[in-house]
Amino acid sequence: MKRRTFTLGGVAAASTIVLAACGGGRTAADAGDGDDAGGGFDADATIGVSLPWLGTQNWAEAEDLFKAQLEDAGFTALIQAADNKVPQQQQQIEAMVQKGAKAIVVGPIDGTQLGSALTAAEDAGVRIIGYDRLIENTDAVDATVQFGSVRTGELQGQSLLDGLAERKGEGPYNIELFGGGPADPNAPNFFQGAMSVLQPKIDDGTVVVLSGQTDFQQAATQDWDNGKAQSRMDSILAANYSDTPIDGVLSPNDGIARAVITSCKSAGQDVPVVDGLDAETESITSIWAGEQYSTVHKPTSDLVAKTVEIISAYQTGDEAPEADETENNGTIDVPVYALDPVVVTKDNAEEIFADDPDRLALLDG
Ligand code: BGC
């Protein structure tokens, strides 16, 4: 068993990822369903899906895809989004339990704030799956389905370096660093993955962060708010780049990437090399137009399909498919189904989106 512990700005990260093949968490019997012949629950059971917000394209896509895929599988879908407000998400989960949901899928706003709502759900025999984000500090979780979040960050950091070499000639390069919302357990992992690639280049002088803001807490963007990222970029440019070009910016997702590009343009800068995440419509268009350099694609349809596959195993009472690894959530080692994210640039976009007609259609001309 290989255990990886990550360090972030000198502080040990809250979670430890253990790479190991392992089973899919609690059995139906553990979840209180063991007295049914064959375990499981009714084939048309209600399945709750609690999304954190609909502020980025991936969550809006998840809302539509969960409805379609759960209904195709014969379930009754009960889907809600919580507008980034933790109490709202807690209440939505409680209401799903009251309405008899047999499984609840949760993309937590704050990974650490759902313990009591989820314990009550577990006590009612509900199966609980973390979706895209880890549910932290509770044993009331069966599994997490996500794209490797540290891996995502590594791809972002490497893509930034590749873009700098491709577009900005010889180094050293001036870059700045952005992170996502600090309550989202993905955000420190994305940053940590990226810094594992960038820190050696900072140390050897290949890249320079003129603002000096290299810790996650300094780089984080409260609530993943694009406007806040844009204001921070405006301030950094005003303070450090009035007569110096900025060459690149690490961005944790596409919305922040576009906010950063807008800020740089209004400061009269050439467009820097900026990576992203989510393969959002506007960013694919920007990449195709030669502005944003890259994005990391983590297809929502695949993530939803994997989640529905696991729920279907819970429904029949069969053993869930084998997880890829476990991640310690502060309380237990959670089985994690980890899908592979992929970098998209102008060079490979047509190939990556060959089977995605909506995104492919953005690449015309
Ligand atoms: C997701 C990203 C998304 C971000 C903001 C993250 O947890 O992994 O896809 O852009 O949240 O919504």
Image (spheres, rainbow, N blue to C red):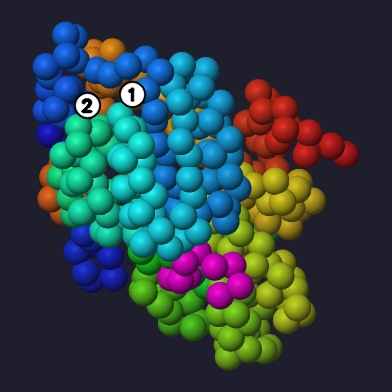
Residue numbers of the magenta segment: 220-228
Q: Is mark 2 within 8 Å of ligand 1?
A: no
- Magenta-drawn stretch contains 221: yes
Q: Is residue 39 left or right of residue 91?
A: left
Q: Is mark 1 within 8 Å of ligand 1?
A: no
Q: Is residue 282 left or right of residue 112?
A: right
Image quadrant for the C terminus? top right
Is residue 57 placed above or below 33 in the rendered structure?
below
Relative image position of residue 276 (x, y in whole percent): 57, 54
Element under label 1? helix
Which residue corresponds to the image point at 36% horizontal and 62% vertical from the top-left? 87
Which residue corresponds to the image point at 29% horizontal and 70% vertical from the top-left? 9
39 and 290: which is toward the camera:
39
Which residue corresponds to the image point at 68% horizontal and 88% vertical from the top-left? 243
Is residue 311 placed above or below 17 in the rendered structure?
above
What distance separates the C-alpha of mark 1 from that of mark 2?
Answer: 9 Å
108 and 356: which is toward the camera:
108
Relative image position of residue 106 (x, y in whole percent): 36, 44
Is residue 315 placed above or below 203 in the rendered structure?
above
Specify the amino acid type for callout 1.
Answer: Ile
Sequence order check: which comes first, mark 1 or mark 2? 2
Specify the amino acid type for callout 2.
Answer: Gly
Callouts 1 and 2 close, C-beta under 8 Å: yes
Check disc 2 and report the residue beneath it.
24
Is residue 154 placed above or below 188 in the rendered structure?
above
Instruction: Identify the mark at residue 310; answer none if there is no mark.
Output: 1
Element under label 2? loop
